[in-house]
Image (spheres, rainbow, N blue to C red):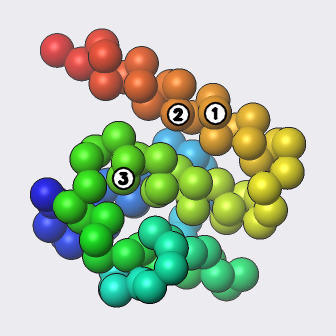
Amino acid sequence: MTTQEKFKNEVLKLAKKVGVTPKAVHIRAMKTKWASCSSSGRLTFDKKLLDEPEEVRLKVILHELLHLKYPNHGKMFKLLLNIYLEKAEEEVLTEP
């Protein structure tokens, strides 16, 4: 489990790596999904995500951050998501 503050810092740290700047990051109860990205750049995450393992949080955060560049699930979005996920896994495996 992580705190809301740590989670938001995680989002902002990954945002820098992706090259995007969310307008706002919110955490609240959501009924049907883990997260959403508004057209204005606001990211909202389900508070249940705080209890998920780091790998799950990473996937959801990267997914939403990439929507700031690509608002759909087209080929470029999927390609970039896979590249960032592979890179993140490599970084975790090579950390001292």
Gap between marks 3 and 1, in whole Å? 15 Å
- The vertical placement of 21 against 19, above or below, is below
Residue 81 in percent (x, y) is at: 64, 41
Pointer 1 with pointer 2, Cβ within 8 A:
yes
Identity of the residue drawn at 64% across and 81% down? 38
Q: What's the amino acid at mark 2?
A: Leu
Pointer 2 with pointer 3, Cβ within 8 A:
no
Where disc 2 sits, the SS reads helix
Where disc 3 sits, the SS reads helix
Could you tell which of marks 2 and 3 lies nearer the N-terminus? 3
Q: Residue 85 got which mark?
A: 2
Q: Quadrant of the N terminus?
A: bottom left
Residue 91 in percent (x, y) is at: 37, 22
Q: Quadrant of the C terminus?
A: top left
- For the image, the number of numbered tags is 3
Q: Is residue 57 left or right of residue 17?
A: left
Q: Nearer the viewer, residue 78 or 95?
A: 78
Q: Where is mark 3, residue-wise?
A: 57
Q: Does any portion of residue 21 appear in the rendered image? A: yes
Q: What's the amino acid at mark 3?
A: Arg
Residue 21 in percent (x, y) is at: 55, 65
Q: Does any portion of residue 16 appear in the rendered image? A: no
Identity of the residue drawn at 57% across and 46% down? 18
Q: Is residue 15 left or right of residue 82?
A: left
Q: Is residue 55 left or right of residue 63?
A: left
Q: Nearer the viewer, residue 11 or 60?
A: 60
Q: Nearer the viewer, residue 52 or 64?
A: 52
Residue 94 in percent (x, y) is at: 30, 13
Q: What's the amino acid at mark 1?
A: Asn
Q: Where is mark 1, residue-wise?
A: 82
Label 2 Cα neighbours within 10 Å, binned few <14 / some 14-19 / many ≥20: some
